[in-house]
Amino acid sequence: MDLRYTAEYERFRDGLRAFLSDNWPLRGPDAEKPRAAQVTIFRQRAIDAGYYCRNIPKKYGGSEQEPDVLKATIIDEECESVGAPPDVRPGMLVLTLLERGEEWQKELFLPKSV
C-alpha cells in the first residue's frame, strides 16, 4: 500500500511552503507589533490565500474551500514546522450555524469565529 501524498497534494504543499516563506515570520513594521496583532495579520493573509478557515463561506470571513482532510493535515504539518500560528478549526457551533442557522445568526456570529 502506497501512503504517499499524490502529486496534487505535493503541489499544494509546495504552494503552502512558498506562502509560509513569504508570510511567516512577519517582516518589516508588522514584525514589531505585539504577538496577538502579528497572529491576526498572518491569519487574515492565510484566509485570503485559501489556507485557513477553509470551510467557512467568504461572505462570513472564511476562504470558502472544499473540505479536504489531507489538505488540512498538510496545513497543520507545514505551519507547525515553521512555528506559524495554527488554523483554528470551526467548532460545533460554527458547523451547526452553517447547516441550520438563520441568516441573521450567521451574519452575527460567523465573522467573529474566523
Image (spheres, rainbow, N blue to C red):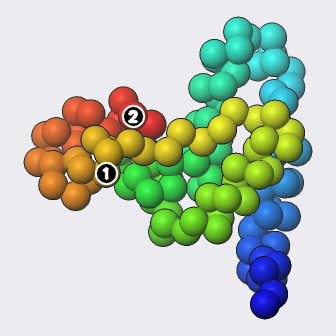
Question: From the image, which quarter does the N terminus lie in?
Answer: bottom right
Position of residue 56 measured from the top left corner of the image (x, y, whole percent): 40, 52
Query: Earlier along the polypeptide chain: callout 2 or callout 1?
Result: 1
Mark 2 neighbour class, 10 Å CA radius: few under 14, some 14 to 19, many 20 or more: some
- The residue beneath circle 1 is 95
Amino acid type assigned to the residue bearing label 1 in the image: Leu
Residue 79 numbered mark, or none: none
Please tell me which residue lies in front, 13 or 73: 73
Q: Quadrant of residue 81?
A: top right
Residue lying at the far front in this picture: please name it. 1
Horizontal relation, residue 93 to residue 42: left or right: left
Q: Quadrant of residue 35?
A: top right
Measured Cα–Cα span from mark 2 to mark 1: 11 Å
Residue 113 numbered mark, or none: 2
Position of residue 47 measured from the top left corner of the image (x, y, whole percent): 57, 46
Check the image and report above or below for 30 versus 99.
Answer: above
Position of residue 106 measured from the top left corner of the image (x, y, whole percent): 22, 43
Please tell me which residue lies in front, 45 or 10: 10
Check the image and report above or below for 85 versus 52.
Answer: above
